[in-house]
Image (cartoon, rainbow, N blue to C red):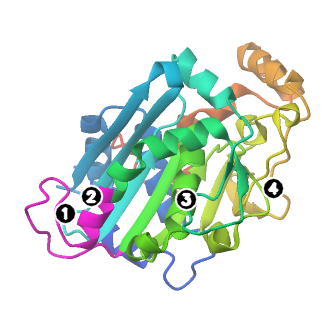
């Protein structure tokens, strides 16, 4: 039996970002990237893959809200280790076969928000579609985290686990990454949720689109240092939405995959000036392999499986139980 992929995963996650909070952790990145990638699946598949990684007998709670007419497609999984010490909140990204989901991504809007910071006067412009999707499932997820803080099982809130929550991670791919970041910002800015936000170790996102326009409200600026954004070369989504739809910017640490490794970059991915490059990225995805190098972007680079392949440490067994080069 090749599983678990990580024999002491709970300890690795509890220890992650404790001594070096601003440094990317490759094990955390691989685990959260796997969780984010499989969050497009059903709860049984998510639970199976995370058990294989090293979280046996964990609780897996599926949170969902879908309202087509309001362009709401909000799905998240809340996973609690069997002992209770670790919780992962993983948001699902844009589903490729859902036109409504894509329309929600395009709903940039002109929303100004305090990110639900009580008494705040500072506002920040947020992507309206992303923000609406975070808000619709917000309280359900918060209630699960309150239970975890109190040492209750997410499978049955009347039952106890051995330990209360020690380490919280939030993650997502694509739209899911944008929602993960907004969720963390809302947590950090609200004193009523201080007990939860104090447990937040990091936010790991993969292929995350632009989400906010600065400057950030002072109350949430500290969260930016806990955001670790991953971008593969050729992925157009981190440069979207384009500038004509409203100026937005990235926050946090950006790591790009180059020459087989993840490199911290000083300048974040810049916003596209127009949709022309996005249209070309679709053509690149359909082009012959020998012609793809002539394109700056290709939609093929955005796939969650592409990120997962790049995140897996060399020689480490895959979630399928084999070893790939």
Of 61 and 144, the residue lying toward us: 144
- Residue under label 3, please give it: 116
Question: Depth-wise, is mark 4 or mark 2 nearer the camera?
Answer: 4
| Residue at 63% in and 68% down | 120
Count of marks placed on residues: 4
Mark 3 or mark 1, earlier in chain? 1
Mark 2 or mark 1, earlier in chain? 2
Asked if residue 309 shows in the view, the reply is no
**CA distance for labels 4 and 2:** 33 Å
- Residue under label 4, please give it: 268
| Residue at 43% in and 24% down | 67
Mark 4: give few (<14), some (14-19) or many (20+) Cα within 10 Å: some
Q: Which mark is residue 98?
A: none
Asked where in the image residue 54 lies, by quadrant, the reply is bottom left
**Tag 3 and tag 4, C-beta contact below 8 Å:** no
Question: Depth-wise, is mark 3 or mark 2 nearer the camera?
Answer: 3
Disc 2, SS: loop
| Residue at 59% in and 57% down | 115
Residue that extends furthest to the bottom in the rendered view of this protein = 19
- Residue under label 2, please give it: 55
Question: Depth-wise, is mark 3 or mark 1 nearer the camera?
Answer: 3
Disc 4, SS: loop
Q: Which residues are magenta?
A: 143-166
**Tag 2 and tag 1, C-beta contact below 8 Å:** yes
**CA distance for labels 2 and 1:** 7 Å
Residue 1 in the image, given as x and y percentages of width and height: 21, 49
Residue 234 in the image, given as x and y percentages of width and height: 77, 36
Mark 4 or mark 1, earlier in chain? 1
> Which quarter shows the C terminus?
top right
Disc 1, SS: loop
- Residue under label 1, please give it: 82
């Amino acid at each position: 039996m090749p599983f678990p992929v990580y024999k002491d995963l709970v300890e690795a996650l509890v220890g992650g970002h404790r001594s070096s909070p601003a440094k990317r952790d490759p094990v955390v990145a691989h685990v959260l990237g796997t969780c984010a990638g499989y969050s497009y699946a059903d709860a049984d598949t998510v639970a199976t893959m995370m058990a294989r990684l090293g979280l046996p007998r964990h609780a897996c709670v599926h949170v969902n809200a879908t309202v087509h007419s309001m362009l709401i497609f909000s799905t998240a999984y809340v996973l609690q280790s069997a002992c209770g010490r670790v919780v992962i909140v993983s948001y699902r990204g844009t589903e490729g076969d859902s036109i409504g989901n894509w329309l929600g991504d395009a709903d940039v809007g002109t929303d100004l928000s305090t990110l639900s910071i009580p008494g705040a006067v500072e506002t920040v412009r947020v992507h309206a579609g992303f923000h609406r999707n975070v808000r619709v499932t917000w309280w359900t997820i918060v209630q699960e985290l309150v239970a975890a803080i109190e040492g209750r099982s997410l499978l049955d809130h009347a039952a106890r686990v051995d330990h209360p929550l020690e380490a919280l991670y939030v993650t997502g791919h694509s739209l899911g990454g944008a929602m993960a970041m907004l969720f963390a910002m809302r947590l950090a800015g609200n004193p009523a949720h201080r007990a939860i936000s104090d447990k937040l170790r990091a936010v790991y996102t993969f292929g995350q689109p632009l989400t906010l326009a600065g400057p950030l409200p002072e109350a949430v600026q500290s969260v930016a240092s806990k955001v670790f954004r991953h971008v593969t070369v050729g992925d157009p989504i981190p440069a979207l939405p384009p500038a004509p739809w409203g100026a937005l910017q990235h926050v946090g640490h950006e790591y790009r995959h180059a020459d087989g490794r993840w490199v911290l970059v000083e300048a974040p991915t810049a916003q596209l000036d127009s949709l022309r490059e996005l249209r070309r990225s679709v053509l690149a995805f359909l082009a012959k392999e020998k012609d793809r190098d002539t394109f700056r972007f290709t939609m093929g680079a955005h796939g969650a499986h592409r990120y997962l392949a790049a995140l897996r440490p060399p020689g480490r067994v895959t979630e399928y139980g084999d070893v790939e080069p």
